[in-house]
């Protein structure tokens, strides 16, 4: 099977052109020519992801400076600052794991609106009385299996049922939330297994275990996206579906696997939430799909597919978590927080559209749509 790294420009290239078999770059699979660009490495396609991530680092540092100015009692006290940073990272772990799964789905040309509801469903299913009788292993296994199977259902509907991803995952979002409420009878299921409870209380070298879990997910995801055939196929399918099919990629199977991966991330996020709250509830993960999509977009993942990086999503998660922490420290109302979050998402999408338009203009590629 021939592997390629197509980008949008692939649609304009002859199908029988020798495919680029180089490693996935994590910057959307840009070709060598695109990476060199007409203005050197920094101004070319290869430097695009570096420029974007550098800008996110600057934004993150600016937020820290602003937070130190508004709340010096928290950010200028070393002990409280470190404690607050660890709290931010711990609270961001669940959304961060979801955002990583969402990044793969979006790069592959899809969208998954059901991740928040799947977290709620997995958290409820893994904390039932019957499940807790199997101890910690039973809870972990159930959360992972429920999340993954729900993702497989999404993948089957989209890849083989030919449903639009938006509609299929929207239906799953409603159904999963309803099923979770039915299973739990709209009550909070307290966890009595001590092993689960201790997950959120365990530190390794001063770093919370849940943060290390998030870090491990990020590291594995980076390797998968940039150094494996699965990552190359994901970029190819999202960059140009027809070119990927003609190149011999099983597009349906790849789509199914992407949504299964997103479901797996939902199961992991459910475990994180259950350990943090010491309970399972159908309300777990509400609006998490919004935060996960926002983090991926802020990190530079293109909603059109075929472009995105794990590092960018990680920075997007940190920026979004930092903003949320600022909201809390400044005692902003939840309604105001949601308005600002919505504005940030719109701003990120607009910036992305202008950026992609600029790249196409430099490469002489006509705008689509």
Image (tube, rainbow, N blue to C red):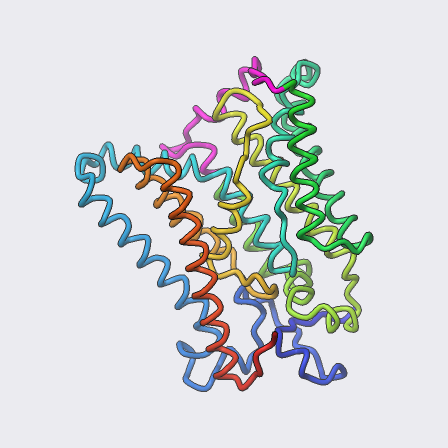
Residue 340 percent location from the top left of the image = 38, 48
Residue 345 percent location from the top left of the image = 45, 54
Which quadrant does the N terminus fall into? bottom right
Which quadrant does the C terminus fall into? bottom right
Could you tell me if residue 205 is visible in this image? yes
Residue drawn at the location 26% of the way across and 37% of the way down: 330
* Total numbered labels: 0
Q: Is residue 263 magenta?
A: no
Q: Between 81 and 168, which is closer to the camera in this rendering?
A: 168
Residue drawn at the location 44% of the way across and 50% of the way down: 342
Q: Quadrant of residue 251?
A: bottom right
Residue drawn at the location 76% of the way across and 83% of the way down: 16
Asked whether, in this view, residue 253 is left or right of residue 322, the answer is right
Q: Between 198 and 348, which is closer to the camera in this rendering?
A: 348
Asked whether, in this view, residue 220 is left or right of residue 236, the answer is left
Q: Between 162 and 99, which is closer to the camera in this rendering?
A: 162
Asked whether, in this view, residue 211 is left or right of residue 79, the answer is right
Residue drawn at the location 65% of the way across and 56% of the way down: 110
Q: Quadrant of residue 204?
A: top left
Residue 37 percent location from the top left of the image = 48, 82
Q: Which residues are magenta?
A: 186-213
Residue 140 percent location from the top left of the image = 63, 28
Up the image or down, 221 lies above or below 22; here it is: above
Q: Quadrant of residue 234?
A: bottom right
Residue furthest to the right:
160
Q: Is residue 192 magenta?
A: yes
Asked whether, in this view, residue 86 is left or right of residue 273, the answer is left
Could you tell me if residue 315 is visible in this image? no
């Amino acid at each position: 099977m021939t592997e390629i790294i197509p980008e949008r420009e692939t649609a304009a290239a002859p199908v029988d052109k020798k495919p680029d078999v180089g490693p996935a770059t994590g910057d959307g699979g840009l070709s060598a020519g695109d990476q060199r660009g007409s203005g050197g490495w920094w101004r070319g396609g290869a430097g695009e992801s570096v420029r974007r991530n550098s800008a996110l680092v600057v934004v993150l540092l600016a937020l820290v400076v602003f937070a130190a100015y508004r709340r010096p009692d928290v950010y200028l006290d070393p002990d409280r600052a470190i404690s607050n940073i660890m709290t931010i990272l711990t609270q961001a772990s669940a959304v961060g794991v979801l955002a990583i799964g969402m990044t793969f789905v979006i790069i592959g040309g899809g969208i998954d609106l059901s991740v928040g509801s799947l977290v709620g469903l997995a958290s409820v299913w893994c904390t039932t009385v019957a499940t807790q009788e199997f101890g910690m292993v039973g809870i972990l296994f159930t959360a992972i299996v429920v999340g993954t199977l729900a993702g497989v259902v999404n993948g089957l509907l989209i890849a083989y049922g030919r449903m639009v991803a938006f509609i299929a995952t929207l239906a799953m979002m409603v159904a999963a939330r309803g099923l979770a409420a039915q299973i739990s009878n709209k009550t909070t299921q307290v966890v009595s297994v001590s092993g689960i409870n201790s997950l959120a209380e365990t530190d390794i070298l001063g770093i919370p275990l849940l943060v290390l879990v998030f870090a491990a997910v990020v590291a594995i995801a980076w390797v998968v996206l940039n150094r494996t055939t699965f990552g190359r196929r994901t970029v190819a399918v999202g960059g140009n579906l027809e070119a990927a099919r003609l190149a011999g990629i099983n597009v349906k199977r790849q789509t199914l696997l992407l949504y299964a991966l997103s479901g797996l991330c939902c199961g992991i996020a459910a475990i994180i939430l259950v350990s943090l709250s010491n309970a399972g509830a159908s309300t777990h993960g509400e609006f998490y799909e919004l935060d996960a999509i926002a983090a991926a977009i802020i990190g530079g993942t293109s909603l059109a597919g075929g472009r995105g990086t794990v590092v960018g999503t990680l920075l997007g998660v940190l920026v979004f978590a930092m903003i949320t922490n600022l909201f809390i420290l400044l005692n902003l109302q939840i309604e105001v927080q949601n308005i600002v979050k919505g504005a940030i998402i719109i701003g990120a999408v607009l910036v992305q559209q202008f950026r992609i338009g600029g790249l196409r203009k430099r490469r002489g590629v006509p705008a689509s749509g």
